[in-house]
Image (cartoon, rainbow, N blue to C red):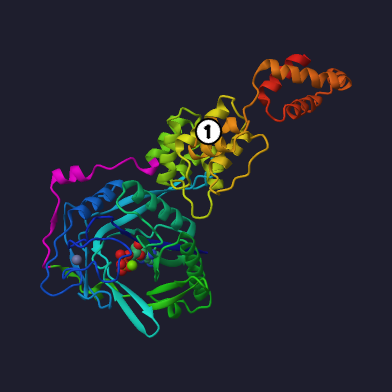
Amino acid sequence: MFEVVIGLEVHVQLNTNTKLFCGCATSFGEAPNTNICPTCIGLPGALPVLNKEAVHKAIMFGKAVNAKINQTSIFNRKNYFYPDLPSGYQISQFEIPIVGEGELFIDFLTESDKHKEDGSTKRVGIARAHLENDAGKNTHHGNASWVDLNRAGTPLLEIVSEPDMRNADEAVRYLKKLHSIVRYLGISDANMQEGSFRCDVNVSIRPKGDTKLYTRCEIKNMNSFRFIARAIEFEVNRHIDAWEDGVYDKVIVQETRLFDVNTGETRSMRGKEDSADYRYFPDPDLRPVIISDEMLAEYSKIPELPDEKKNRFVSEFGIKEYDAAVLTSSLEMALFFEEMMKEGISGKNAVTWLSVELQGRLKEGATIENCGISAKTLATVVKRIEDGTISGKAAKDVLDYLMTKEPVITVPDNVNSMADLVNAIDNQDVDKLIDCLGLKQVSDDGAIIAIIDEVLNANQNKVAEYKSGKDKMFGFFVGQVMKLSKGSANPNKVNDLLKEKLS
Ligand code: ADP
Ligand code: ZN
Ligand code: MG
């Protein structure tokens, strides 16, 4: 009955060394009002000078989303009053942004590699991306409000989507894709907790089939995918309820709203201005930004992007498209995987041991980078399974020990030298660890045959049953051999040799 319409504005803080229009540092977490100068606190007469690195990074982004780059763009003053904006205007881009129309593709891959009926990808239009400076920060302490201008003037790239998303899921997928593109480009740390990647969510509804846009509400400054989804759901319900109660025109007005994480509701913050209210005009202190052809060529060089990496992982390492999409959604994971593959192991095994075993063992707050085990070490563990040195089960033990951080570790009975064990863990020496823990599989035919003979001799009536057609006895024999070998026999070998013996 209704269709949901969502458009997103994402503010990405570019990781330039200095601010957008002055030489102040862009560092995070310094004492309040220490990274400031006359320009970024908007003193009259101080002149802005555009940061070339920000222009470079904006163009890299434009290239990544297949956008038109405007080789001439201009900066405008967007006039409004707010205590954290002492100049009374923000320097932004309006009529001609540096990055024009582009596009981004979101994925709907599922684990079974079966795609949604509407296809495996959806195109979301990008309307524009423009450079602007950030404001400072207000903090409220009892009755007093403090202003910290350290952040004032840091460069933002505001990426504005077309209103192309139809539900919260699509919006979150769009944001995740955008986040990973920005991380791959290395143009921002995109740290959401610190606000380096934050989003304004515009939501409206309309009767299905209608193509006009209805009144939108904008939910400001969201920095968690989970809360964004919840805010959209709340807002959609509010719009639909208003429509169904016949009060849509009264209740739904163009406004800026805030999401309250405690109640899960949005509430009105202020009426939303139309662009005319900002009295945009070209900033007389800044000349148009002109990108020469040479500059454009130079700035257009970008690294491999998530989709390209995903496709390459599929063709080069033979892994499932879904797995490749999960791996490449995070740059850290993708690089870790590539590093593992340098050890010549199977792609499928690498996926399992990285995304199931290693990730499953990460404690709260731990990341693949600081978990203490390198890609090479993990790949060595996998290699030892592949060459039959250890069983998959033993490999899990090895990984547990490698990732032990506690000063006291449980010493298995069969460890001869505690010092050797600690050493092996400290040095992340997989082979030594396997030795210490006595996990080596017995793959030697003679030793396994001896055990098989023992088992078959002790169970002669069962052998007779098997030979008379009771096939499922086979599993019993395998179990007995494994038990007698204390789990150390190579199960593939056991299978082969048993078959031979019993035929
Ligand atoms: P402003 O900065 O005033 O919010 P922008 O044009 O920068 O305006 O951003 C508007 C955003 O809202 C865009 O992402 C656009 O796709 C989206 N949008 C516009 N109209 C609607 C609507 N009716 N419903 C949902 N989203 C909308
Ligand atoms: Zn400054
Ligand atoms: Mg907006």
Determine crowd level at label 1: few under 14, some 14-19, many 20+ residues with C-alpha closer than 10 A.
many
Residue 299 magenta-drawn?
A: yes
Residue closest to the eye, 210 or 479? 479
**Amino acid at dot 1:** Val
Q: Residue lying furthest bottom in this view?
A: 143
Q: Within 8 Å: ligand 1 and the Cβ of disc 1?
A: no
Camera sees residue 235: yes
Question: What is the quadrant of the C terminus in the image?
Answer: top right
| The quarter of the displayed image where residue 12 is located | bottom left
| The quarter of the displayed image where residue 133 is located | bottom left
Above or below, 475 against 5 in this view is: above
Residue that carries the numbered disc 1 in the rendered image: 430
Residue 324 magenta-drawn?
A: no
Ligand 1 positioned in quadrant = bottom left
Residue closest to the eye, 3 or 501? 501
The residue at 50%/76% (across/down) is 242
Give left or right: position of 311 versus 39: right
The residue at 21%/46% (across/down) is 299
Q: Residue lying furthest right in this view?
A: 461
Q: Which residues are magenta?
A: 284-307
Percent across and percent down for residue 303 are 30, 41
Percent across and percent down for residue 234 are 51, 69
Give left or right: position of 343 versus 275: right
